[in-house]
Amino acid sequence: MTTMTDSSVREFKMPDVGEGLTEAEILKWYVQPGDTVTDGQVVCEVETAKAAVELPIPYDGVVRELHFPEGTTVDVGTSIIAVAVGDGAAAAAEPVQEAVADTPATAEAEEPKPEGRQPVLVGYGVSTSSTRRRPRKGAQAPAAAQEASAAIQAEMNGHGPAAPAAPSAPAVPPAAPVTGDRPLAKPPVRKLAKDLGVDLATVVPSGPDGIITREDVHAAAAEPATPEPQAAPAAVAPAPSPTAAPTSYDTTRETRVPVKGVRKATAAAMVGSAFTAPHVTEFVTVDVTRTMKLVEELKQDKEYAGLRVNPLLLIAKALLVAIKRNPDVNASWDEAAQEIVVKHYVNLGIAAATPRGLIVPNIKDAHAKTLPQLAGSLGELVSTAREGKTSPAAMQGGTVTITNVGVFGVDTGTPILNPGESAILAVGAIKLQPWVHKGKVKPRQVTTLALSFDHRLVDGELGSKVLADVAAVLEQPKRLISWA
């Protein structure tokens, strides 16, 4: 991961923070040339196709050079930072700082990035030491960059591209202690600040040793923003004649978003899956009234106290029971060996929508877990994903997947297989509908399930049996006892 270029300078290379990753994007530098670093100190945050990770430096010294600016995608194994160590550290510190004193690129690097990006997963924990650096002159982000960032954030939140903001005078920053240090805050607090659009440098810390807490961030977010002066109304331009050609191209009507990180990996995986595995999707609509009643009963059970109990828990268990009864569906296609690989274990994937895109962490050996154990694993998986701490290892090795489109009010869908898996179950919204029950039309809780499978190794009969078994368990949850 490191190499020596001379007797006093070490080059820190971009590591493979996952298994088999080839590149990563530098999201943020936490140090600049001339800063002193210590062994284990976080120097930058990078985003891969699987997660965002903070990288610690493995030695003491003085930063000599940053080889790439923020926003650059770098191949694994490429040197990203040079650090003077040993006797060369003291000699390097002062000249490097003088060299960067009035460099525009340095001022740009210190500028806070727009809040459109929301990285997750801090892989190595927060640094225990702060980096001393000289105060540098900030610079306002270009208006185009701010508009692009706002559009990216709006798109990830499902609201489409944001309208461009009207030009306004620079806002006066709120009063806060001014220091040359990087604000001290734990990774979840940093992510919270990014989510809420709070600059940690403006937050007054209340934690021990000057650490910023979640409460500090919420308090800063609740403070009223400094009102901006109203922009003068723009003069109304005369309407062009029908035959007149446009004088300029309206650049505010489109926003181009670079395809990076999770979105890039997801796109490649979905294209590969769609054009490699012949997909077949089958549907079934089922009365889940008894399942919903069981969910309410389990919530009152002391054995499930503190656990996440919801319909997804019983749907997951129903799928595991169906796989046990039809084990050939839990398989993969080995193209090179021309073999079907039947798995005697189930790593159950749960598709999760996050600000960074769709991720599919999985519960290892889900087939061997009791219902309370499965509830605990599901709760941990969801909490980890929401906090942005899902590790690359948690998203590898899945065998089948569940995607819950019902949370968005969608009745059903035709899900695309997760690459390397043979089946994926989509769960639609559970709604009160008129249903024939015991010969009479009654209001019942009803949902639609969709099972997509790889037709190379799962034929129509096997796929139908799996989907029918899942539906049968959800209609009569007591089958969990007799079939499990």
Image: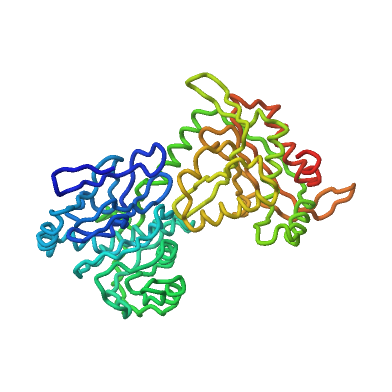
Above or below, comparing residue 284 to residue 207 in the picture: above
Residue lying at 73% horizontally and 33% vertically, measured from the top left: 325
Give the color scheme: rainbow, by chain, secondary structure or one colour: rainbow
Above or below, comparing residue 85 to residue 168 in the picture: above
Q: As drawn, which residue projects farthest toward the right?
A: 439
In-front residue for pair 320/261: 320
Residue 436 showing in the rendered view: yes
In-front residue for pair 393/411: 393
Quarter of the image that includes the N terminus: top left
Quarter of the image that includes the C terminus: top right
Left or right: where does residue 347 sit relative to residue 29?
Answer: right
The percent position of residue 51, horizontal first and vertical second, equals 42, 49
The percent position of residue 180, horizontal first and vertical second, equals 24, 70
Locate residue 75: give its quadrant: top left
Left or right: where does residue 441 sit relative to residue 420?
Answer: right
Marker count (numbered): 0
The percent position of residue 234, horizontal first and vertical second, equals 29, 72
Left or right: where does residue 385 sit relative to residue 28?
Answer: right
Residue lying at 68% horizontally and 40% vertically, measured from the top left: 320
Q: As drawn, which residue projects farthest toward the top?
A: 338
The percent position of residue 417, horizontal first and vertical second, equals 55, 36
Q: As drawn, which residue projects farthest toward the front?
A: 87
Residue 250 showing in the rendered view: no
Residue lying at 72% horizontally and 60% vertically, measured from the top left: 299
